[in-house]
Amino acid sequence: MSGWFELSKSSDGQFRFVLKAGNAEIILTSELYKAEDSAKNGIASVQKNCVDDSRFEKKESSNGKYFFNLKAANHQVIGTSQMYASIASRDVGINSVKTNGTTTTIKVNL
């Protein structure tokens, strides 16, 4: 099974999306958006930018865990990964976003 996006509303009325892999694990989480259409534009940006290796910013947190950001052409962060214990597992996460991020399946949970 391929991945999908889930669009939801936060407790304060803002919108966010997550990208899930085929096993339902969250592989990318967006920022909060004030409008539903803005969140949908964020999903479209993931679909467009996830195929470009240069859009992935590989990072290390202050606690020694690894994560990545997916950025748009204007260098704004579209989504952030979970924390990974190793560089190798972070890179597997990036490949999962590249594989699943072009999906057109969007599950709305508002």
Image (cartoon, grey):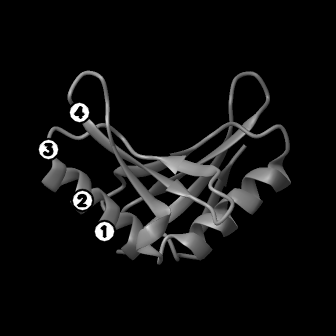
Mark 2 crowd level (few <14, some 14–19, many ≥20, 10 Å Cα): some
Q: Amino acid at mark 1?
A: Asn
Q: Is tag 3's residue or tag 1's residue first in the polypeptide sequence? A: 3
Mark 3 crowd level (few <14, some 14–19, many ≥20, 10 Å Cα): few
Secondary structure under tag 3 reads loop
What whole-number distance in Å separates the C-alpha atoms at marks 3 and 4? 7 Å
Locate residue 45 relative to residue 20 in the image: left or right.
right
- Give the residue at x 14% y 55%: 88
Quadrant of res 59: top left
Q: Is tag 3's residue or tag 4's residue first in the polypeptide sequence? A: 4
- Give the residue at x 81% y 49%: 36
Secondary structure under tag 4 reads loop
- Give the residue at x 24% y 22%: 63
Locate residue 34 relative to residue 89 in the image: left or right.
right
Q: Is tag 4's residue or tag 2's residue first in the polypeptide sequence? A: 4
Q: Which residue is mark 4?
A: 65
Q: Which mark is residue 91?
A: 2
Mark 1 crowd level (few <14, some 14–19, many ≥20, 10 Å Cα): some
The x, y position of residue 27, in whole percent, is 39, 52
Q: Quadrant of the N terminus?
A: bottom left
The x, y position of residue 10, in whole percent, is 68, 30
Q: Amino acid at mark 3?
A: Ser
Q: Quadrant of the C terminus?
A: top right
What whole-number distance in Å separates the C-alpha atoms at marks 3 and 2? 9 Å
Q: Which residue is mark 1?
A: 95
Secondary structure under tag 2 reads helix
What whole-number distance in Å separates the C-alpha atoms at marks 1 and 4? 18 Å
Decide: is 57 above or below 96. above
